[in-house]
Amino acid sequence: MMDSSYRTMSVDANAAEQQRFMVRVYNWMTAGLAITGFMAFYVANSPAMMNIIFGNPVVPIVLIIAQIGLVFWLASRVMQMSASQATGVFMLYAGLTGITFSAIFMAYTSASIFSTFLVTAGTFGA
């Protein structure tokens, strides 16, 4: 006799649930990329911010360490966080990544960077 507490999902229902989940994941990645791109563009177009961040060689190192530390902290705590806390930390990480990525504007043109972010965000949003 089968245990009635087991729920079985049809293959189609399972595939549909997986698709809904992946759409949500890609939407969050698109939002994160948009925040990262905005922050990188904002910082790169602010001479004062660029001077603060890249005028002192210690600041970029601190930013990178903070970014990596935030990843480890989020990974270890995300299951204990509320959805709004996890969302806030994810947005903070995306913004911090944008600040770090603003250095890319010193090496590449704005047009090439914008098109790369657009293609990447479009890939996650599709």
Image (tube, rainbow, N blue to C red):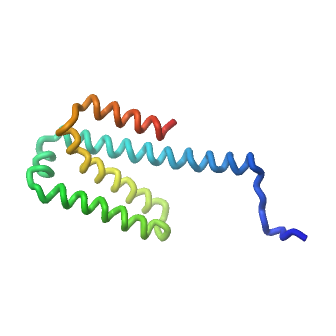
Q: In which quarter of the image is the N terminus?
A: bottom right
Residue 113: horizontal and vertical position, in percent?
A: 29, 34
Image-quadrant location for residue 106: top left
Residue occupying the far front of the picture: 107
Image-quadrant location for residue 5: bottom right
The residue that appears at 40% across and 64% down in the rendered structure is 74
Residue 47: horizontal and vertical position, in percent?
A: 12, 41
The residue that appears at 22% across and 31% down in the rendered structure is 109
Residue occupying the far right of the picture: 1
On screen, residue 109 versus residue 27, left or right, reads: left
The residue that appears at 35% across and 45% down in the rendered structure is 35
Q: Is residue 56 above or below residue 46?
A: below
Q: In this view, does 19 lie above or below 7?
A: above
The residue that appears at 43% across and 56% down in the rendered structure is 87
Label total for image: 0
Residue 67: horizontal and vertical position, in percent?
A: 29, 59
On screen, residue 80 versus residue 53, left or right, reads: right
On screen, residue 109 versus residue 1, left or right, reads: left
Residue 68: horizontal and vertical position, in percent?
A: 31, 61
On screen, residue 16 versus residue 103, left or right, reads: right
